[in-house]
Amino acid sequence: MQVNPIDCKMSVALDMIVGKWKPIIIQHLIHRETLRFNEIKNLIPDISHRILTLQLRELEEQDIIQRVIYPQVPPKVEYSLTAHGKKLEALMDSLHYWGLSHLKHMEEKEKNDIIGNQA
């Protein structure tokens, strides 16, 4: 299917997942299905408590993840992908494999540039 660049909604998708932490949060939820806040925090040690909270809220507002609060003491909160969020799995996998391919491509390019400069 050919998309007219003027009508392209790629920016909508990118706005949803772009950022340093959102793709990582989504990937963890794809592979682990349900996680508590501290489990996510432990899986992403470099993220601050505040930023993780903000990223989770944004993903929840966009119906990518759902937050379930269990009425107990202490409160238990779990995060998981919504049915809509699970549709991102193929896209996230494609981006991952493209990223791996790109790294390999750039390594090869660097090697070729070094060899070309030595000749």
Image (spheres, grey):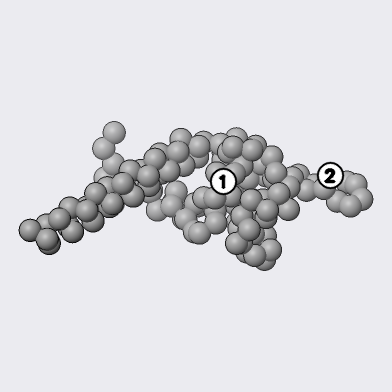
Q: Which image quadrant for residue 94?
A: top left
Q: Which of the image's four quarters has the C terminus?
A: bottom left
Residue 70 lies, in percent from the top left, at 84, 44
Q: Residue at x 55, y 44 (%)?
A: 27
Q: Determine whether, in the image, residue 81 is placed left or right of residue 67.
A: left
**Element at label 1:** helix
- Tell me which residue sits at (49%, 59%) in the image: 19
Name the outermost residue toward the right.
73
Read off the residue under disc 2: 70
Relative to 20, is 25 on the left or the right? right
Q: Position of residue 58 (x, y in %)?
A: 60, 56
**Is residue 77 visible to us here?**
yes
- The residue indicated by pointer 1 is 26
Q: Is residue 2 above or below residue 14?
A: above
Other-residue count near label 1 (Cα within 10 Å), few / some / many at <14 / 14–19 / ≥20? many
Type of amino acid under label 2: Tyr
**Disc number at residue 36?**
none
Tell me which residue sits at (68%, 53%) in the image: 42
Query: Which amino acid type is shown beneath numbered disc 1?
Result: Ile
Q: Nearer the viewer, residue 6 or 93?
A: 93
